[in-house]
Amino acid sequence: MTTTTDTHCPYCSLQCGMRLHADGAQVEVLERADFPVNRGALCGKGRSAAAVLAPGARLTAPLLRDRRGGPLRAAGWGEALDRIAQGFSATRRAHGADAVGVFGGGGLTNEKAYQLGKFARVALGTASIDYNGRFCMSSAAAAHRIAFGLDRGLPFPLADIPETDCLILVGANPAETMPPAMRYFRELRERGGKLIVVDPRRTPTAEQADLHLQLRPGSDLALALGLLHLVIADGLTDQEFIDARTSGFEPARAAAMAHWPERVERLTGIPVSQLLEVAHLFGRAATGMVLTARGPEQQSKGTDTVGAWINLCLATGKAGRRYSGYGCLTGQGNGQGGREHGQKADQLPGYRSIEDPAAREHVAGVWGVDPDSLPRSGRSAYELLDGLGQPGGVRALLVMGSNPVVSAPHAGHVTERLRALDLLVVSDLVLSETAQLADVVLPTAQWAEETGTTTNLEGRVILRERALSAPEGVRTDLWVLRELAGRLGSASDFPDDPELVFDELRRASAGGQADYAGIDYRRIRAEDGVFWPCPDAGHPGTPRLFLDRFATPDGRARFAAVTHRPAAEEPAGDYPLYLTTGRVLAQYQSGAQTRRVPALNAAAPGPFVELHPRLADRLGVVEGELLAVTSRRGRAVAPARITGAIRQDTVFMPFHWPGPGRANTLTNPALDPTSKMPEFKLCAVRVERAAAEVAS
């Protein structure tokens, strides 16, 4: 049978519209020009997304081990689910409810994220749940809530970007991470607006900027404070806006004035002349935006760093107005919705706090349970992983849609902790590196084989439509949760129909900050998505937040009184260089899906170490030669890629690959005290020729 289905890409947070044409077993991705976010444009990952649907690329039957260290073998669903339920029940009896844990993912649909949180709190009764989105947007989310009282990645639609006069893009490389978004930045410049990119590397995005600030890794906070200092000193603040719509300016002003230009030049490596140019461009512009991504956020001071960039917007009156504001370029496909509906350690649906008595009562009423039966806050993602198999930690773990063996910081240590579990269960599309360690592996349906909603970086709730039937032997995650809840004796209902789950999510989110009560599948189909908050069916949705008031109790945005501090680990002694990590165009996240697509592997076949020619000369290294990169946590080996696009004191590695070139073997799990974000974006390393190291 031939079918054509309008749906969305399974990869990044743009959630680009696409059309799937299926002719029997042949599936083709077509452009969908009428969807407003990407207007038909797709990157190579999106165009090749159907390749992962092929039988040879994915799991099609449950797998389990008969003994620890034994091989995985095919099993029936009944045997696999019974094994899991018995293992979870035995762990709860022996060690308590919190010894059973759940680790979710930012790629799960809203329905799955919601149901996973409900499953943890109701069917398992555990506080031990978090998800890999903690590693992505948590610092920006924390700063958003501190400043504005609400967290949505972008408080405006992407279509507003070309209309602003000056945009500062901090630690983001959308030319490689979300290529269809680049048209908005090109249109901004074509209209006469200025694009300023802040990045230690001259990335393809920086190549298209009017000005590139190639700062020292970890100095983003000092840079933002230095720019605010200059804006204040040169009289470019908007005092009327500060007085009418903000609070806390004086402590923030005092903190910024301790970051004079010459000091900031020493800290960042950015010349005073460039600091002045940027401060004047942004301060004098009638409208302006600051957008951050993982660069400033994945630091042990990420929340303060984002807060400092928000301060710059507030001081110049560039927030809560059309074509102005601060935003975060969310990374994962459902990185926004995934952090709203309950798979975070401290959260209930609707972005409610699990510690709030009113929130507990409301959600418990939807779930039909006693509010006092709900657990309290649990450990954050890295803290949960770090405690696996330890006294007081999780002993049995369900991983759904995540691959921490590749994606977690200090990944060698995390791998050992996963091996220490009494029971590891992984539900995934493919036999990921984490699934290879599991005692039970569950094959789950893919994006094109099930219906469900996601929420893109704009806060637009969209609908991925089922276009194909899953192979025999594959089930949906919602079905898995229903079956496990039944085996565990849960009296609560766990439907596996995604529309029924979404209707329950709407009720659970009603009255919360992320209020979906007025959104349903019919509206999403009719309107190309609906922006939250949308509290009732008559509400039009909210494409632009904060135009009248901020979401704080007094309606005012709050300045953050923050000051520069060093990274948790700065180069010194045996580790004289910075390592920074990131993505490349043809791969995505841990690579579990994209590494199975031949066209993408041909474009990006493996890891590498990017270094400056002068550093290469000092090391006696030539292009393609194997380098050993060593941090205090481990060693990675990958070929050299020599380029003048990176600072001389910094090396870069992409994080998509396992094995000897795994970048996250090296990264530092030092946590931001507020967001619990690990410091992925910089650590101290030494670099040597691998052959020379072996010879010595």
Image: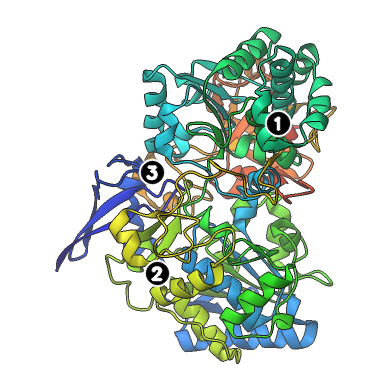
Type of residue at label 1?
Asp
Q: Please, which residue is most extreme toward the top here?
A: 273
Pointers 1 and 3 in contact (C-beta within 8 Å): no
Q: Residue 434, how many percent across, how many down?
A: 58, 62
Nearer-the-camera pick, 479 or 461: 461
Type of residue at label 3?
Leu
Which numbered marker is on residue 243? 1
Residue holding disc 2: 445
Type of residue at label 2?
Ala
* Residue 487 to residue 103: above or below: below
Question: Which tag is nearer the camera, tag 3 or tag 2?
Answer: 2
Q: Residue at x 70, y 31 (%)?
A: 243
516 left or right of 26 in image: right
Mark 1 vs 3, N-terminal side? 1
Q: Residue at x 60, y 71 (%)?
A: 117
Residue holding disc 3: 600
Q: Residue 140, how many percent across, how many down?
A: 64, 44
Question: Which tag is nearer the camera, tag 1 or tag 3?
Answer: 1
* Residue 506 to residue 87: above or below: above
Separation of disc 3 and disc 2 at Cα?
A: 22 Å
694 left or right of 350 in image: right
